[in-house]
Image (spheres, grey):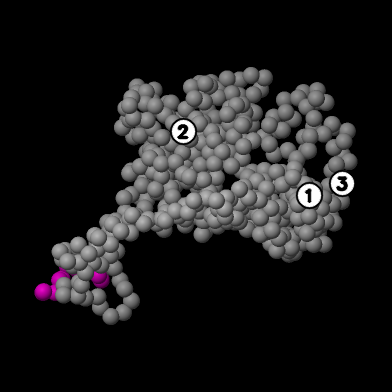
Amino acid sequence: MPGLRSKAIAQDSKTAKYDSMPRNAVLTGLVDYVLPVEEIPAKLIEYARHRAGLQANMGKDGILSQTTDYLSQICSLLRRQLGHDFSNYKQGTLVRRIQRRIQITQNTSVAAYVQYLKTNTQEVNLLFKDLLIGVTHFLRDPEAFDALQHSAIAPLVEQSSSDKSIRIWVAGCSSGEEAYSIAMLISEEMERQNVRPQVQIFATDIDEKALEQARHARYPASLVEHTIPERLERFFIKQNGIYQVVKHLREMCIFSQQSLISDPPFSRLDLISCRNLLIYFDSELQKRLIPLFHYALKPEGFLFLGSSENLFEYNDLFQVVSKTHRLFRRKQPMILPQVDFPLVDRSLYRQASQFAPKTVVGQQSQVTQSIERILLQDYAPACVIVNDRDEIIYYFGRTGKYLEPPQGLPNNLEQMRLLLKLKPP
């Protein structure tokens, strides 16, 4: 049925003759019910009846028509109770995940589900967990990670030294697979180049339960099945069908709870990996987030995105290293972008303090700019500033004596021709 997702049921491993398969399924965190095998048929019938009842409330596209009307109310509940804001997540993603919880809780309407949320703290946490569900495993998209290793990690290791650490941020790390994948590539590169720089991989997420799993670094076989045998043997220890990441990789990674849109970013980073997270944010939040990444990176630092994400409209901030594999390098623009922080209004949060000190943003900077402007006006000649694409990005002073744009829509190529054919003073 379009628009409705099925729920997952696993047999209780205590009742299974061979318990590894149901136990590994539960460890993925994607199972909704864990039941003895004799209770599973009744649960399936119950689910089917409720599913059929929801059909009457569904539109042609399979989406419950009322869901969008309640999105702001549901986001407000999550924000107040958990301190996390989903209001800038893409609407379609939120609607699908909310509908799934309506099915599982067997509420008859969105309004009934909202009331259920208000009185059930556990359901708020379960909805939160569903909103964060992503597909992850080690070295997902191997060709992209090969490009990362050759074009970013290898030069970072080569340029490192014993007194200069490599600093990496994995944003939205979930249960840690991506962070440990990058740690593997760095370990291989350090051995290849015979160097031992200090490596710090800051891996962050808003899901504390996922972070706890990442810290334990224990994974079912299904999550390591794409790892080549050589890496599996070198970087994992197998115990009772569970694979644990080796100690020296675990020591590279620091896992902490952090909201990408409301908590302070890291800084002076060599690499940011933020794969398949931007696709969940609306365009407005993405526009505010990219300058934040630019701010957090060192000059010439790298940004690694997912296959469906790009920075093609941010040519002033990043240059393309690999278009196919979404690897970018930080540029130093002529004019630094405005960095908004936090990216959301903190006054909406349940823990926002009315006693928080108010700061005057950029007061010293404004005074400095005023002094510079006065000095330049009196003592500097008129000029224009151009970027690396020979486009005029700023006029200073009265440039009419030297160049004059033609009538009509502005055209940067035409402006450059004017620069080359200056009027006599």
- On screen, residue 115 versus residue 194, left or right, reads right
Of residue 48 and residue 371, the one placed in the foreground of this image is: 371
**Label 3: how many residues lie within 10 Å, few (<14), some (14-19) or many (20+)?**
few
Residue 178 seen in this snapshot: no
**From the viewer's perspective, is residue 42 above or below residue 181?**
below
* Image location (x, y in percent) of residue 211: 59, 34
Task: Look at discs 2 and 1 and give the one toward the viewer.
Answer: 1
- Is 29 covered by the magenta stretch? no
Q: Given contact means CB atoms under 8 Å apart, are the residues at marks 2 and 1 in contact?
A: no
Q: Which numbered disc covers residue 119?
A: 1
Q: Quadrant of the C terminus?
A: bottom left
Q: Quadrant of the N terminus?
A: bottom right
Of residue 166 and residue 264, the one placed in the foreground of this image is: 264
Q: Quadrant of residue 190?
A: top left
Identify the element where label 1 is drawn. helix
Could you tell me which residue is drawn at 20 percent across and 72 percent down? 398
Circle 2: residue type = Ile
Identify the element where label 3 is drawn. helix
* Image location (x, y in percent) of residue 10: 77, 35
Q: Which numbered disc covers residue 46?
A: 3
Q: Which numbered disc covers residue 201?
A: 2
